[in-house]
Image (cartoon, rainbow, N blue to C red):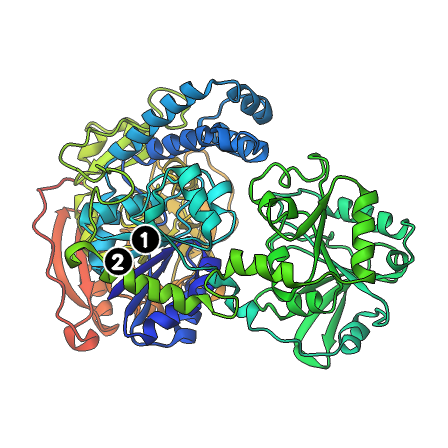
Amino acid sequence: MKILLVVKQKKNIDTFRRTIACLLERGHEVTVAVQERDEQRDEKLTRDIGHERFAIVACPPARTDQWTAVAALLRSLRDCLHYLRPALRGAVKLQTRTVLKLRQEIQIPGDPEAVAAALRELPPPQVARLEALLKLAEQKLPADSLYDEFIRSHAPDVLLVSPLVHFGSAQADLVASARHVGVPVWMLLFSWDNLSTKGTLHRPPDLMFVWNEQQRTEAQTLHGFPPERVVVVGAPRFDGFFALKPSMTREEFHAPIGLDPARPTVLYVCSSRFVSESELEFVRGWVREVRGSRSPVLQGCNIIVRPHPDVPLLPREEPTEHVRWPAAPELTAQVARPFGDPRAVVIRTAYRSSIGLFESIWHSGAVVGLNTSAELEAGIVGRPVFTIVVNPREADGQAGTLHFHYLLKEHGGFVSAEGNYKHHLSDLGDALKAPPDPAAIRAFIETFLRPHGIDTPVAPLLAEAIERAFDARPGGAAVGAGSGAEADTAGDHTEAPEAPEAPAPKKGADDVVALDVRGLRIHLHVTPEIRRGKRPINRLAYEEVVDWLQSAVGIGDVLYDLGAGIGVYTLFAARHRAALVVAIEAGYSSYARLCENLLLNACDGIVVPLPFALAEADGLREMKYRLRQQGRDRYTLRNRWRPRPSAAERTYVQPVCATALDKLVERFDLPAPHHVHFSRSTATRPVLSGAADTLSRPSVKSVFMTVDPKGLDGVVEMMQTFGWQTTFRRDGSVDHVYLGFERPATAVGQAPRTAPPDPLVMED
């Protein structure tokens, strides 16, 4: 079985690493794509797993077609309405968050809390009508052709996605494309709160793999997902934690952090920023209440505060000390004492390992938290957990969420919750004096995290469940369109209506124009050259380079656009190939337009714009612009800059910091390129001299240049010395020539790619 797993970020991969290993051991092929890119992380993960049937590939981070803006707005509206359902109306914090996101999407004024309160006044029947309308609109969105291409290129037997449920999730478009190309798509639940706190299920999968029966019920009641299409397997993310054992004695743990092992210890586990924006102030107050209680055991106990891994609890200026435990040399921590209390410390250990959290829980008699998954880890160790229901001003992501209530004793859980400090401290003190029976805690943990047996790891069970689901397909055929939880009509490109023009930020009616080339579209801020042009912008001569981008640049490849100008080719590569682009442009006016156009086309997250002039070596040089083109992309890089008197009639000579491309790549650790585009200003022998190492990298697959005919022979000769051969040549006009280069077949082990078809006759 060929499995394609697409996840949003690294922590999703960490959750399913053991399942991936099990699938590989069973003989399956697993390809992983992480939508939030990190080249070094991917290389490390590939080395760590080290299996011939495992690979990490690039994936489009979001849809890139003309429906992008419409899809984003539609999903924001659906998320808002989702929290108006009767079962979710009490989740005020979650609803306010969706309103805030919608407000950002369409830039409407008003306080989000007030808008959310007004929406709650809508009668349920009207909410249902609006939901039905928006759901139908979502189903009618066409599939994105780039996602179609991505899935087809890997030809999986099944597509797995995680987390899928997320505000405006880009993975919804993956589901649509999977249905369009006839690939079954299954969702792997990542966290205990995904189904309740992350908005609506915009595109339901064919199957959903969840932790427990409660989540099966959530899928049905909150998202209308058929319970018979939900597979309960358990929570694979906790397998590693279940396997941990204490590595030191109580004395060995407490002594390095300056605490008395003879005293009982309380561990406070902090929550995410979503739960509390300023938890430190609450913790300070909680510590004061503990010390001021009537219980001698609380007055003298040790207190350890563990920050949430994503939140810097203490200000940077807070003094800390580095601590290492001799009994566990691999475990280190930063320890602070911000409470003026010798028996209360803040400990931050390395979060890439769970050992620090495990040891902290193991050596504590009780755990306290507001609303965090660390409470589940405490339950795995068998420790009682306590919380105090606080004022929403202190933690509005606590009682105002659904998943907070799942762990409470009154709902069948194991967490003791009180509404005031008197009862909270009384319960906490009693637990330290006489630890409660852990049997009830263990029973809940088994039901919630390991419903097939508390001693049975979940990762192998999930791998087996995936195999069984694949074998159980009707007739052994792929699950395709219309076979999931809804009749999904996405992906009909032929009948899809033309996408409306996305509104663009502009100062006047003519400040933004659309550029269509080969059926692909980007938007540009109007430049003086475009204003002076005698032809419509969509007839400018861009086809040759766009043809190369379409034929050579793979999804997620890294493109260096040298002399990027205002970003035309950068935008085509980023939007329509999901390429990561390093765009280098020295002209000050063009660079400003480049950055503006990145924002206009929502490409700022996958493009690195750099304002450098490229040369054969570092130095302060003179850059002379063409007459009447100050700051544009037509310039000449000349000798070392020298001071000179100003003259109004002379073309501006700009002092610039020039550098060789090789040094730029090394100095700033730029991602390794797969393709390099040289504009006419950069396709020169001096620039090539400074790019020898970069062009010699094995990662580079193709090079495209726009060359001045006067320097054509020298450029071709230099590229040949770097091991490149010319694959095609086109004469653009009297003052430029298009050249394409690839490595010889003997150098790369494959035949050269054929040249693209002859383009239309073009003008400069």
- Residue topped by disc 1: 186
Depicted 394 relative to depicted 59: above or below: above
Under mark 1, the amino acid is Trp
User: Helix, strand, or loop for circle 1?
Assistant: strand
Depicted 482 relative to depicted 26: above or below: above
Q: Give the image location of residue 750, x and y in percent.
A: 15, 72
Residue 38 picture quarter: bottom left
| Residue at the image point whose x is 46% and y is 46% from the top | 654
| Badge 1 density bin: few <14, some 14–19, many ≥20, Cα 10 Å | many
Depicted 429 relative to depicted 629: above or below: below
Q: Earlier in the sequence, mark 1 or mark 2?
A: 2
| Residue at the image point whose x is 12% and y is 70% from the top | 751
Residue 53 picture quarter: bottom left
| Residue at the image point whose x is 22% and y is 45% from the top | 483
Q: Give the image location of residue 36, x and y in percent.
A: 42, 54
- The answer to whether residue 706 is seen in the rendering is no
- Say whether residue 413 is left or right of residue 417: left
- Residue topped by disc 2: 158
- Figure quadrant of the C terminus: top left
Under mark 2, the amino acid is Val
Label annotation for residue 488: none
Q: Nearer the viewer, residue 98 or 724?
A: 98
Q: Nearer the viewer, residue 511 or 314?
A: 314
State yes or no: discs 1 and 2 in contact (Cβ < 8 Å): yes
- Figure quadrant of the N terminus: bottom left
- Say whether residue 349 is left or right of residue 216: right
